[in-house]
Amino acid sequence: MVDSAGTGCAGTKTKDVVVNGINGHIESAMQDGKTVKGVRAPEEREAMLTGDVKPIQTQIYCKRFLILAVFSLYSMVNAFQWIQYSIIANIFCHFYQISYEQADWLSVVYMLVYVPLIFPAAWLLDKKGLRTVALLGSGLNCIGAWIKIASVRQDLFGVTMFAQTVCSIAQIFILGLPSRVASVWFGPKEVSTACATAVLGNQLGVAFGFLLPPILVPNTKDDINLMAKNISVLFYGTATVATVLFILVVAVFKEKPPLPPSQSQAVLLDTPDDYSYKQSIINLFRNVPFVLLLLSYGILTGSYYSVGTLLNQMIITYYEGEELNAGRIGLTLVVSGMVGSIIAGFWVDRTKTYKQTTLAVYIIAFIGMLVFTFTLNLGYLQVIFVTAGSLGFFMTGYLPLGFEFGVEITYPEPEGTSSGLLNASAQLFGIVFTLAQGKLKANYGTLTGNLFLCSWIFVGIILTVFIKSDLRRQRANLAAGAQLAVRDSLEKVSTSQNELRAPAETSI
């Protein structure tokens, strides 16, 4: 059991602190009628958000792990549904009698729908909160999964496209939540790890999406009835799991804990209810470091989306009939990335070196993409497993870093807004990169398509170099700790003065 600085369960003794301003600057502390002046008075923006100095209590609850687990699981199923078509694209092309370009849209629709709808979704998150958005995300995910079952017929590609569109709308209420779930439920020493774990759930879904479809739906192109039966098994299994998770969300997912888990989150509770969402968006686009992060995050994550979508086509170009190994290579890419995500989360939780870590991961991801590109056609699948694993470790490991870095440099703007914009950027770049790389691959070969991505990732490195590391949320937490230290010192001085007065009063 610990307080806001640790990782224990409910029932902990909490502390009252005094904080003023978004950056946690201390205006004053009162003890025995004396005032201790702080660093400076709050700026106009800070005063607008937090108002007068108020006592704040913080506490961490064990239920945070249940909330995180449920969110990660339904995020996993949604990500599974994104990639389940692409990793066996040649099989679905044969079943529905469609082209690869049409099959690519089953992945691209996830990105296309996200861009126009992220703004109303982020507004809904700010106004209605976590529980409402979680219900929408898991509910739509469940509905889309059941519609897919009705599409297992060769002339019903339109139905499966509609079902995938419903699932893509569900994604809008999922992708922006990791940083919000982490901030609302987890303490300052574990928030980055919690965010990484939430992102990991989504990546786990992609991993299963690479692994299971090639196993459940082998390439039985000479037996369409067997192929349809196998596709039905895939869709029924997905719908069953999605339904169970929707019921879990209804039963256990709560809006927020009774008390906030950190001082930075507690300060946000004083934000006026009528604070303008439009103004928040304007503030973010005026924040130059965030705009640079917006572009660099979109480039690397969009490249990841493109590689994931086209991986099956890349592999079978050089290794015909290796659909199963294409899935295993995708699994290797994602699982290594999950390890990278957790390590990155632990690292920045303890060091707070967001800028340095983000830049290092970006550079190594660029090197990994180059190595993957030039080893793809060597004829050795074992080499592809190694290079894909190295690429995934850093490319996927970057995802939670980008989320948390964005929250840090935009505090106290809502986490859902900054995360939503980052994801919108990723979807935009993902659409452009997937369609452009697919076209380049078809016209000039796989090597040209991959070099196209490498050039853009290099641009992302340059943008990252110029991001100013202004860790506002971290400053708020540190200032709160400083305020506690000031108050403790005043209490000790007061106690010492009382002890000195006591003998004098006795002698009198």
Image (cartoon, rainbow, N blue to C red):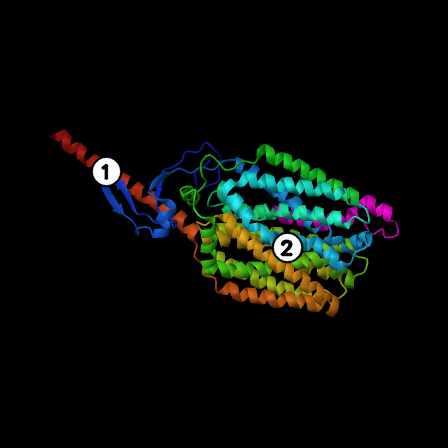
Tell me the quarter of the image containing the C terminus. Answer: top left
Few, some or many C-alpha atoms within 10 Å of disc 2 (few <14, some 14-19, many ≥20)?
Answer: many
Does residue 378 lie above or below 233 as drawn? below
Tell me, for residue 428, which label it has, or none: none
In the picture provided, is 98 more to the left or to the right than 245?
right
Is there CB contact under 8 Å for labels 2 and 1? no
In the picture provided, is 5 more to the left or to the right than 403?
left
Q: Residue, x 31% and y 44% (percent of image)?
A: 486
Question: What's the residue type where badge 1 is placed?
Answer: Asp
Tell me, for residue 112, which label it has, or none: 2
Whether the magenta-drawn stretch holds residue 207 is answered as yes
Does residue 231 lie above or below 354 as drawn? above
Q: In the rendering, at what x and y percent does residue 368 appear?
A: 63, 63
Please tell me which residue lies in front, 381 or 137.
Answer: 137
Pick out the residue farthest to the left.
Answer: 508
Of the image marks 2 and 1, the number of the one nearer the N terminus: 1
The prevailing secondary structure element of the residues shown in magenta is helix
| Residue 428 in sight | yes
Q: Which of marks 2 and 1 is in front?
A: 2
Whether the magenta-drawn stretch holds residue 204 is answered as yes
- The span picked out in magenta is 201-230
Q: In the rendering, at what x and y percent does residue 443 appear?
A: 74, 69
In the picture provided, is 366 more to the left or to the right than 48?
right
| Residue 390 in sight | no
Q: In the rendering, at what x and y percent does residue 87 appear?
A: 73, 53
Few, some or many C-alpha atoms within 10 Å of disc 1 (few <14, some 14-19, many ≥20)?
Answer: few
Which secondary structure lies at badge 1?
loop
Does residue 470 lie above or below 156 as drawn? below
Question: What's the residue type where badge 2 is placed?
Answer: Leu
Identify the residue under disc 1: 32
Q: In the rendering, at what x and y percent does residue 35 appear?
A: 24, 44
